[in-house]
Amino acid sequence: MLPTNFRANIRSGKHQTHTSGFCQNYVQANLVILPKKYAFDFLLFTMRNQKSCPVVEVMEAGQFQSKYAKDSDIRTDIPMYHVYEHGELVGKKMNIKEVWRDDFVSFLIGCSFTFESQLIRGGIPLRHIEENKNVAMYTTNIKTKKAGVFDGPMVVSMRPVPDSLVQKATEITSLFPKMHGGPVHIGDPEKIGIQDITKPDFGDFVGIKEGETPMFWACGVTPQAVAQHANIPFMITHSPGCMFVTDWKNEDYLHEG
């Protein structure tokens, strides 16, 4: 399915779940929306934490159409949004038109779903896609670098990979620096503060079989953990796993990079 049609299905309510495995040849992005008052601090935060928050696009205040998606509307084209007030999740919405303000600045942040199609082409199985589940995500003890009011822990996504393909998965994902790049950790989850790998903070656990190694990539859900930690007065994000699908092809991203 083309991204334009996929976004139309999201806008009409026909698609209301995660976007992993959909439009696999196109770049997907995380979303953060903040009042203009906090936009500079957050931009500085992304610059200091490019592994977890690689910026793809920053829109002007009040703008809601991405340059990477024709006829798009950032307020309606994501399956589910999270609304935060003072660090607390206060609402989940299918569109945010009713709470939209002209001083809102939208940030699109690279997403690891983008490199999944390349992993599959490289012969690396992804069980969450095979089972039509959301990827497992965890809050870690890895600290982000503070900027203004923004501070907090890094969130990671986890994919179990056959031991023999760990190096190949590292090499493939390293080709996507704006989509979190190579893994931040490989192996023992307790070393990054994950006490129970079977209980992700977001998404679905799909098991780790004998002969597989858990691999962890920085995740664009990090701003949500940061918002909770820093008690940001108001913030809107995508719901974990529910991304903004652009018209930007993976091959064009790789060529541009």
Image (cartoon, rainbow, N blue to C red):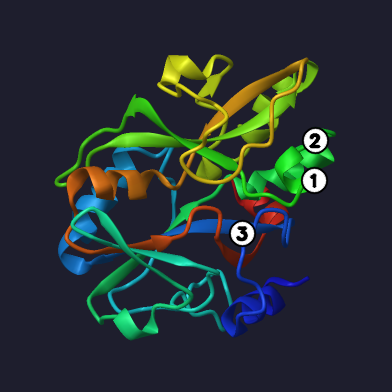
Left or right: 34 in relation to 254: left
Q: Do callouts 2 and 1 mark residues in contact (Cβ within 8 Å)? A: yes
Left or right: 54 in relation to 10: left
**In 3D space, how far apart are the residues under numbered discs 2 and 1 (Cα atoms)?**
8 Å
Q: Residue at x 34, y 85 (%)?
A: 98
**In 3D space, how far apart are the residues under numbered discs 3 and 2 (Cα atoms)?**
19 Å
- The residue type indicated by label 1 comes to Glu
Name the front one of labels 3 and 2: 3
The image quarter containing residue 107 is bottom left
Q: Which mark is residue 130?
A: 1
Q: Which of 43 and 226 is in front in this view?
A: 226
**Residue position marked by numbered label 2 in the rendering:** 125
Q: Which residue is drawn at 66% across and 54% down?
A: 20
- The residue type indicated by label 3 comes to His
Q: Which of marks 1 and 3 is nearer the N terminus?
A: 3
Left or right: 128 in relation to 202: right
Q: Where is residue 116 in the image (x, y as percent from the top left)?
A: 70, 44
